[in-house]
Image (tube, rainbow, N blue to C red):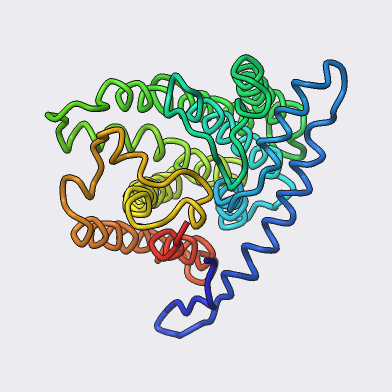
Amino acid sequence: MIAETEKLSTNSTNVEFDLSAYLKERQKLVEAALDASIKVEYPEKIYESMRYSLMAGGKRLRPILCLASCELVGGTIDMAMPTACALEMVHTMSLIHDDLPAMDNDDYRRGKLTNHKVYGENIAILAGDGLLTLAFEFVASQTQNVPAERVLKVITQLGRAFGAAGLVGGQVVDIESEGKPDVSLETLHFIHTHKTGALLEACVLCGAILGGASEETLQRLSRYAQNIGLAFQIIDDILDITQTQEQLGKSAGKDLAAQKATYPSFLGLEESERQAIQLVAEAKAQLAPFGQQGMPLCAIADFITSRTY
């Protein structure tokens, strides 16, 4: 569950940061923006299907990361909200498609029946397509008071993260590796950094780009995001083994049943958790120059390793 107050040390001074309140506040803003982003019109079924998965809940960590990084570099929530929504649209697309029988064949997501179980495989595929294309339209048409070159840079970043060089490429290698006994740790690293990490990195970088971050700051935030992205996936691997379907809101034990390579299968649970904690520590070290302004991103990094779903 979302925590307790996070106590973070900034400039040798103990400062309390209420992560739970922060996430709840940002989640409420994101939910309202997402709700307004898609209206049901003819043909109703496709919009209802898109909304079904987009509004199914979830932690909304990806859009919150985008908002936090924009604020970190002096931008505003309003500048980043369309891109934050777009990131959640694409994340939702990836979940809809990932759950399909041709992919992971899952029946539950976020505690609800998966999209294809409600609307059929054909509509679920098209709902994912609709969300992916809407994401780019939304960034281009709804972003206000941001120089055009920054918006263009964000669109480029999103395209790279979502395509064959990112999420799609990671998914392909994941599919090809399923059930193979000789998958290497390097291949597993590739899968995780592309399938999961590329989107998380895009969340952090896009917010910072919109806020006008320098190249040096973008490089620092890129390292932060790469570390939390890998830590996030390692924890996912651990939770798939240790938690129940009710706790996760999706089927548990799927990785083991599909004979997927995971960090626990290579390293064991204890060493996997140790590596995730180390990655989070390295991520937080990248935020040291930002002082108290970096506390939200620091707290989110800690939350990644302490979450139970």
Q: Confirm whether residue 289 shows in the render.
A: no
* Image spot of residue 71 (x, y percent): 62, 56
Compared across the picture, whether 125 is left or right of 79 comes to: left
* Image spot of residue 235 (x, y percent): 35, 54
* Image spot of residue 196 (x, y percent): 41, 38
The image quadrant that residue 260 belongs to is top left
Q: Confirm whether residue 28 shows in the render.
A: yes
Q: Nearer the viewer, residue 303 or 51?
A: 51
Residue in the picture at 59% in, 18% down: 121
Q: Is residue 181 above or below residue 185?
A: above
Task: Identify the residue at the far bottom of this view.
Answer: 13
Residue in the picture at 43% in, 23% down: 103
Compared across the picture, whether 214 is left or right of 254 comes to: right
Q: Is residue 41 above or below residue 287?
A: above
* Image spot of residue 106 (x, y percent): 48, 33
The image quadrant that residue 293 belongs to is bottom right
Q: Nearer the viewer, residue 3 or 159?
A: 3
Compared across the picture, whether 245 is left or right of 179 comes to: right
Label tally: 0
Task: Identify the residue at the far right of this view.
Answer: 41
Residue in the picture at 38% in, 26% down: 171
Residue in the picture at 38% in, 49% down: 236
The image quadrant that residue 37 belongs to is top right
Q: Nearer the viewer, residue 251 or 30?
A: 251
